Image (cartoon, helix red, strand yellow):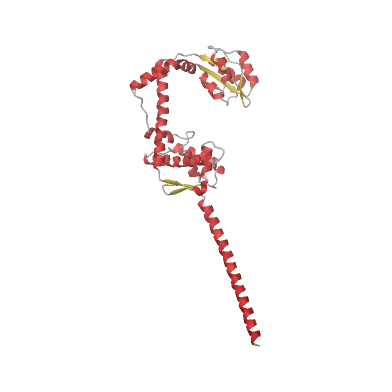
Amino acid sequence: MQNRKKMNQAIERQKTGKRRLSQLIAGIIIAAIVAAIVWIVWDVQSRRWIVEFEGRRIATSELQLHGVLEGMDHTFGPDQAFLVDSIVQAEVLLQKAREAGIYLTEEEREITLAMAEANHELFPNIPVERVAELLSLDFSFTTLLQRVMAHYATYEPDPFAFAAEFAEYVENHRADYELRSTVSQVILSDNRDALVAVQEAAPTTPEAFEALARELVFTEDEQGVFEAPIMSFVEWFGLLDNSGELFGLQEGEMSSIIDVGDGEYILVLMTSRPGITDGEIEAMYRERIVIERGAEAFMELLDTWTQEANYRVNQRAMAR
């Protein structure tokens, strides 16, 4: 009898031990699941921002927007590091613009907002206002960046150094400017047969050329005759193979009909070969070097600002 009682007690202790072990194992499993969920949530949250600039976190989704603005196909690997630098520089530029009281005009703001709204489906996780703010730094849409550059990094050439530099430059590049000064008219059209008809009519003046374009090529609502230096046409349409013919045209002569791709053709009439003075070349050259060297000085300044900026990169987001 005594032995049976002891046996029952041992069995009961064994059952209790098993229950406690099961409870312990269940507790461990539940704790592991909770920890995993917490870690996953934390990991996802921690990767949602890519840069913290002046205490404000910038969403990782902006990498794609900066990739588009920089003309890149990828937002990972080496490109991702470049785009992070682009994000920081954009924030620095916007900060410096605000400090200098430089803002978009109302018209520019409407342009960038319209562009942002038109492309919002590409960046659904970024507020339209934020997309517009970053577009404001693009040369294609506004002059905000130009105004920031002009405010912080103007360049004025030294008169004596410029005189010597220009004398050497004009000696080597006069012919280039003379080519750029040749003025011509061009018809751009997808109707090759109509261009053949204009060519066969053989107009020799700008007025006759344009009148035939209106009569044979375009409707009243279309615009297709424009005027610019021959060099501009060569650059715009990539006509290096045709440059010999175009530069060889005399006043009143027409070119052959040139295929510029995408089903379109141009017909060129040489209208005049005006001369160009050293003073005009100097003015154009001065304008160019002021822009170029001012931009170089500004980029050096931007590098300094970026190095001094208060920001940190989220390495977890970079490592995804």
Quarter occupied by residue 15? bottom right
Q: Is residue 223 left or right of residue 166?
A: right
Q: As displayed, is residue 150 above or below residue 265?
A: below
Q: Height in image: 78 above or below 251?
A: below
Measured as percent of width and height from the top left, residue 138 is found at 48, 36
Residue located 63% across and 20% down the image: 194
Relative to residue 2, is residue 161 depicted above or below?
above
Question: Does residue 93 appear left or right of residue 29 in this picture?
Answer: left
Judging depth in this view, the residue of 40 and 22 nearest the camera is: 22
Q: List x then y, in percent, for residue 174.
A: 45, 15
x and y percentages locating residue 19 in the rendered image? 61, 73
Q: Residue at x 48, y 44 (%)?
A: 130
- The residue drawn where x is 49% and y is 37% is 111
Outermost residue to the front: 3
239 and 105: which is toward the camera: 239
Q: Nearer the viewer, residue 28 or 226?
A: 28
User: Can residue 69 be seen in this snapshot?
Assistant: yes
Quadrant where the image shows the N terminus:
bottom right
Q: Report if residue 147 is visible in the image.
A: no
- Please give left or right for residue 248 compared with residue 8 in the image: left
Instruction: Look at 40% across and 26% down and name the residue there.
Output: 290
* Percent position of residue 218, x then y: 60, 23
Image label count: 0
Farthest residue, direction bottom:
1
